């Protein structure tokens, strides 16, 4: 078995999506893929309910905490809290383009001030023994030349950051919504590839537009890693082949039945803690995407999970409408069997 670093494949931090229940589900699909929290602001940790934002299950490792902020002292303290909580990495968000984030002077707008990012990175590295990484865009607005991007990376790298996760689109901070910023600015993989060439001592991880493990493997011929976002959330079963196809383990992917049978005890445990079933099922709606029975699956979960007293039986009833051969398929069309044989 080849040993490859966790950054080889990761699931992007996504607000309102990659919460702790989502991450437990994703971990059942892949043991090796690096998972990230949703972005947590320094203010939420230092002045709010830290446990609500930070609690996670031990099974979620390897797990990175993504922070949002720009004040070096606050970032350092938040990183210390994250380390004490047991996270494996601290990541700084320098890519989110939302108005709320801009108003807080963090996220993608920080690309205009690489020295501020460098100060934050240096403070976090001094505070913790964990890897401190940065996730950013290739540019913002009219500040999108390669020279400016090169200056950003070199400045932050000088502060000790060794891993840069690069969304291969620029962010347009005025006039586009966050959703539009994930779709309208064109993907420019060649820019990320140039960074990889110019900074051979850094780990440059590609993010943006990757839709399959096959695409990820192709990018890994030059990138230090690949991060997949929305596609994993909408078609989570693609993660099932990651341990074998990406990390080189001599193992077959779990079937969807095996994943659900492993998830059900977690569901029961969370229901006993008064977590609503809908909070647990919304992350698994896409498990049968493209397969026979997918419509029944989504309809059953969507219509019944929010009802008073809804329990794990809703998931079992949804499974009952899936053909046995689909439940027991290894790989979306069985192709992973061939690739791992």
Image: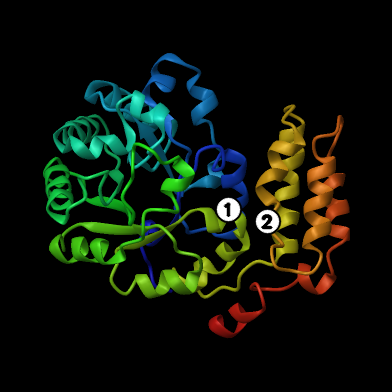
Q: Which residue is tagged 1?
A: 233
Depicted 332 relative to depicted 78: above or below? below
Q: Is residue 17 shown left or right of residue 199?
A: right
Indicate the position of residue 292 as horizontal and vertical percent values.
79, 69
Indicate the position of residue 256 as horizontal and vertical percent values.
71, 63
**Mark 1 element type:** helix
Q: Is residue 97 shown left or right of residue 333?
A: left
Is the residue under label 1 in contact with that under label 2 (CB below 8 Å)?
yes
Which residue is located at x 57 percent, y 39 percent?
20
Indicate the position of residue 51 as horizontal and vertical percent values.
52, 24
Which residue is located at x 25 percent, y 58 percent?
203
Indicate the position of residue 26 as horizontal and vertical percent values.
58, 53
Depicted 135 relative to depicted 297: above or below? above
Which residue is located at x 73 percent, y 55 percent?
260
Which residue is located at x 80 percent, y 35 percent?
306
Determine the image quadrant of residue 251: bottom right
Q: Which one is in front, 115 or 269?
A: 115
* Cα–Cα gap, marks 2 and 1: 7 Å
Indicate which disc, 2 or 1, sits on the residue closer to the N terminus: 1
Q: Which residue is tagged 2?
A: 286
Q: Is residue 36 shown left or right of residue 293?
A: left
Depicted 251 relative to depicted 94: above or below? below
- State whether residue 71 appears in this view: yes
């Amino acid at each position: 078995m080849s040993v490859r670093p966790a950054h080889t494949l990761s699931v992007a931090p996504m607000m309102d999506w990659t919460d702790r229940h989502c991450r437990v589900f994703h971990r059942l699909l892949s043991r090796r893929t690096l998972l990230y929290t949703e972005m947590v602001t320094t203010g939420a940790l230092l002045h709010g309910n830290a446990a609500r934002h930070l609690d996670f299950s031990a099974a979620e490792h390897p797990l990175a905490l993504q922070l949002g902020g720009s004040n070096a002292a606050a970032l350092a303290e938040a990183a210390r809290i994250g380390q004490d909580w047991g996270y494996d990495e601290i990541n700084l968000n320098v890519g989110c383009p939302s108005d709320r984030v801009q108003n807080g002077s963090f996220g993608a707008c920080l690309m205009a001030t690489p020295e501020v990012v460098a100060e934050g990175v240096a403070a976090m590295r001094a505070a913790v023994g964990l890897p401190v990484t940065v996730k950013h865009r290739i540019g913002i607005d009219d500040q999108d030349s390669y020279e400016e991007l090169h200056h950003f990376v070199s400045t932050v790298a000088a502060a000790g950051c060794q891993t840069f996760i690069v969304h291969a689109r620029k962010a347009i901070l005025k006039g586009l919504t966050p959703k539009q910023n994930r779709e309208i600015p064109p993907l420019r993989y060649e820019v990320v590839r140039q960074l990889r060439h110019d900074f051979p001592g850094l780990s440059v991880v590609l993010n943006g537009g990757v839709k399959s493990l096959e695409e990820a493997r192709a990018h890994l011929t030059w990138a230090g890693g690949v991060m997949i976002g929305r596609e994993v959330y909408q078609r989570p079963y693609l993660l099932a082949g990651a341990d074998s196809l990406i990390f080189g383990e001599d193992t077959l992917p779990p079937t969807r039945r095996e994943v659900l049978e492993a998830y059900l005890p977690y569901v029961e445990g969370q229901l006993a803690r008064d977590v609503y079933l809908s909070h647990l099922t919304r992350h698994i709606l896409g498990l049968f995407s493209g397969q026979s029975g997918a419509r029944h699956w989504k309809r059953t979960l969507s219509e019944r999970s929010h009802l008073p007293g809804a329990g794990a039986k809703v998931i079992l009833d949804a499974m009952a409408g899936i053909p046995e051969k689909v439940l027991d398929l290894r790989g979306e069309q069985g192709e992973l069997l061939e690739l791992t044989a």
